[in-house]
Every structure is written in structure tokens, then in C-alpha cells.
Image (tube, grey):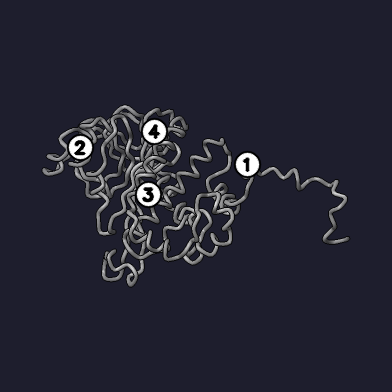
């Protein structure tokens, strides 16, 4: 299944045909028997997806260790996470268990992304009808870390738990947000920051859920021509850094776009819930393995280029450093007297 992710196989029949063509090399990989489609289908149906989830957790720990010193460009030593979700549409006929609405069946992939290395540290696969804010109940806040999220996660009672644990959050306010301004701090409006205020919540249930003070920052995004209002429980960072932190929330959107474009999580090899979750977790493992290889070998190639090279060299018996070398020195040699010319000009 990992071979299928790295080589862009489209079906179980496709996987089997390609693996059988490399039968001699499969022996050295520990695959002694004949690869059959029924075997893969039975494994997708009966082998618990949690096996691959647990393996992904091991890879996550290793990847985070490798990327822990990566610079965010913000002069910030804290860990920064971006939290969001993406919807994976499914065929209504083949996946009746993934009901979302009368016209759509789908799953949600909830992800907490460590922005140092773009490593997913928390992943949950749920029915699409599960609201994003429910993921706040499953996360354990990390003291001193920043959590960047959009308005879908704005629940003051849940966010107050972040404050009690010593974690920081940066999110956006809704349009009907009501508050009481307590302090207005001076700002440099030439930087795009229009106001920096210390506020308290006005509505009864909101104030009861979050009894502490909040920081409200209004920022004008000149690039997109729109006004953004941020809410955070951090009062120490400069306003410009808060705005830049929220801008980096876009990395989790890029992560979703990358895995949907370059890995197999939109078309599935099985129709059961176990098969779908198995394939998603194996795709996550594939992403993590590529990220680990990139860091261990100190490659300057991006993840896309590494994945493309792997797709055509999985069974090549060459040193791995040489496989990722883009040196064309052999192609530049002209002293090949026995090489015939294809075209004679």
C-alpha cells in the first residue's frame, strides 16, 4: 500500500500488476509469496487501521525531532501549531456509511500541523457532520505553544482551557462579536495595525465561559484589501507578530492541498470504513517518510521533487544519495566513441 502511494497506483489490480512485474526484487524485500488482489482486499477489510495510526505516531515523533530547530522567520522560540480540517468527498453509492447530507457523503480530516517542518502532530478522521470545534475537546494544550485557528474554532469556554494550561491561541472574531473595551494601546498604523485593545466579553454566556481578558487586534491586510480582527490571549508579542502568526495558518491549507494532489486520498482501494482510514493513514506515513528522508540526507529538494524521484526509482539498486542527485555530469560527457548518433546533421 505504501508502494501504491509513492508510485501513484490507481487500483488494487494496478498495484498487483506492477508488483508481479518485480517478483525477483520482491523476494529481497521479504515478500516471499505471490501478491494477489484478494489478499490486499482482505487486508483492507480486516486489518485494523489503528496499526498504521500507531506507526504514524512513531514517525511523527522522529520527524518533529529532526525539524525542531527549523526557523519560522518570526524570532519566536515557541512551538506554533495550525489547526484546521478538510473534507474528503465520497461516492454516495459505494460509501453509504459516510452519510453527510442527502446530496453528499464525505469524511473530515482534522489536522494539527506543527509549522516547524509542516509535520502533522494530531490527525482525526471523522464523519463530515462532526463540527471542527469538537476537536478542541480532544487536544491537550501544550504550555507555551501557539495555536492558530480560524473562526470555526471560536468557542470561549473551550478556549479558556487553553489559557488555564498556559497555552496561547490566535483566532479571528466573528462579525457579531460583542465586547467591552478596557484599554487601548498605542499602535503604528503605518504597519497595517489599526488598533490594539484589551477587552472583556460582554454577552453573559461568553463572559461566563471566558471570564479572563482578551486582546483584540484590528489589522488591515493591504495585499488582499480587507480588514482582519484577531483575538488572542497573548499580551506580550508585538501586534505585527500576531498578524504574521495568523498568516502562517495558511500552511495547513497547503498541507491539505499537497496530500490531495500528490498522494492517494481522494480515490480509494476499498469501500469499507476500515479501508478508507487505512489508506489515509498510509498516505500520512508516506508524507512523513519523505519529510524524514529530506531532513536526514540534508536535501535541498522540495517534497514534491523527492516524491517524483521515488516514484520512478523504488526498485532501482542505487545508493539513495545518488538517486536524489540531480547532477547531470554523465550526460555532459562527449568522449563516447562507441555511442551512435541518433540524428546526423
What number is the disc on residue 52? 3
**Regarding mark 4 in the picture, which secondary structure is present there?**
helix
What number is the disc on residue 293? none
| The quadrant where residue 155 appears | top left
Residue 133 in the image: state x and y as whole percent: 24, 48
What number is the disc on residue 160? 2
Left or right: residue 182 compared with residue 252: left
| The quadrant where residue 17 appears | bottom right
Label 4: which residue?
A: 241
Mark 1–mark 3 distance (CA, rounded to whole Å): 28 Å
**Regarding mark 1 in the picture, which secondary structure is present there?**
loop
In the image shown, does 208 or 21 lie closer to the viewer?
Answer: 21
Q: Neighbour class for label 3 at 10 Å: few (<14), some, many (≥20)? A: many
Report if the CB atoms under discs 1 and 3 are less than 8 Å apart: no
Q: Neighbour class for label 4 at 10 Å: few (<14), some, many (≥20)? A: few
Mark nearer the viewer, 4 or 1: 1
In the image shown, does 151 or 60 lie closer to the viewer?
Answer: 60
Q: Neighbour class for label 2 at 10 Å: few (<14), some, many (≥20)? A: some
- Residue at the bottom extreme? 93
Label 1: which residue?
A: 319
**Regarding mark 3 in the picture, which secondary structure is present there?**
helix
Q: Residue at x 37, y 49 (%)?
A: 52
Q: Earlier in the sequence, mark 1 or mark 2?
A: 2
Report if the CB atoms under discs 2 and 4 are less than 8 Å apart: no
Q: Quadrant of the N terminus?
A: bottom left
Q: Is residue 1 visible?
A: yes
Mark 4–mark 1 distance (CA, rounded to whole Å): 44 Å
Mark nearer the viewer, 2 or 4: 2
Residue 335 in the image: state x and y as whole percent: 85, 46
Q: Residue at x 33, y 35 (%)?
A: 146
Q: Residue at x 57, y 51 (%)?
A: 314
Q: Earlier in the sequence, mark 4 or mark 1?
A: 4
Amino acid at each position: 500500500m505504501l508502494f501504491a502511494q509513492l508510485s501513484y497506483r490507481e487500483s488494487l489490480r494496478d498495484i498487483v500488476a506492477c508488483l508481479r512485474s518485480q517478483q525477483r526484487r520482491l523476494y529481497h524485500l521479504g515478500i516471499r509469496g505471490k501478491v494477489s488482489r484478494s489478499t490486499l482486499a482482505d487486508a483492507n477489510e480486516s486489518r485494523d487501521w489503528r496499526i498504521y495510526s500507531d506507526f504514524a505516531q512513531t514517525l511523527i515523533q522522529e520527524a518533529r525531532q529532526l525539524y525542531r530547530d527549523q526557523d519560522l522567520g518570526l524570532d519566536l522560540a515557541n512551538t506554533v501549531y495550525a489547526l484546521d480540517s478538510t473534507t474528503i468527498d465520497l461516492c454516495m453509492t459505494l460509501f453509504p456509511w459516510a452519510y453527510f447530507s442527502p446530496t453528499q457523503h464525505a469524511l473530515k480530516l482534522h489536522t494539527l500541523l506543527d509549522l516547524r517542518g509542516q509535520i502533522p502532530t494530531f490527525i482525526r478522521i471523522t464523519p463530515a457532520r462532526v463540527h471542527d470545534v469538537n476537536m478542541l475537546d480532544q487536544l491537550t494544550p501544550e504550555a507555551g505553544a501557539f495555536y492558530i485557528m480560524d473562526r470555526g474554532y471560536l468557542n470561549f469556554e473551550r478556549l479558556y482551557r487553553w489559557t488555564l494550561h498556559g497555552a496561547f491561541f490566535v483566532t479571528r472574531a466573528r462579525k457579531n462579536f460583542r465586547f467591552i473595551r478596557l484599554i487601548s494601546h498605542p499602535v503604528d498604523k503605518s504597519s497595517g495595525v489599526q488598533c490594539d485593545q484589551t477587552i472583556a466579553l460582554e454577552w453573559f454566556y461568553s463572559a461566563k465561559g471566558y471570564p479572563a481578558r482578551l486582546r483584540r487586534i484590528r489589522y488591515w491586510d493591504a495585499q488582499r484589501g480587507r480588514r482582519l480582527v484577531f483575538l488572542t490571549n497573548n499580551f506580550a508579542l508585538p501586534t505585527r507578530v500576531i498578524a504574521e502568526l495568523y498568516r502562517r495558518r495558511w500552511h495547513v491549507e497547503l498541507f491539505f492541498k499537497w496530500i490531495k494532489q500528490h498522494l492517494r486520498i481522494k480515490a480509494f482501494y476499498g469501500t469499507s470504513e476500515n479501508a478508507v482510514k487505512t489508506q489515509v493513514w498510509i498516505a500520512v506515513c508516506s508524507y512523513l517518510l519523505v519529510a524524514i528522508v529530506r531532513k536526514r540526507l540534508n536535501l535541498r529538494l522540495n517534497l514534491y521533487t523527492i516524491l517524483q524521484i521515488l516514484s520512478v526509482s523504488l526498485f532501482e539498486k542505487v545508493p539513495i544519495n545518488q538517486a536524489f542527485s540531480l547532477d547531470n555530469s554523465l550526460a555532459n560527457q562527449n568522449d563516447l566513441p562507441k555511442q551512435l548518433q541518433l540524428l546526423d546533421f
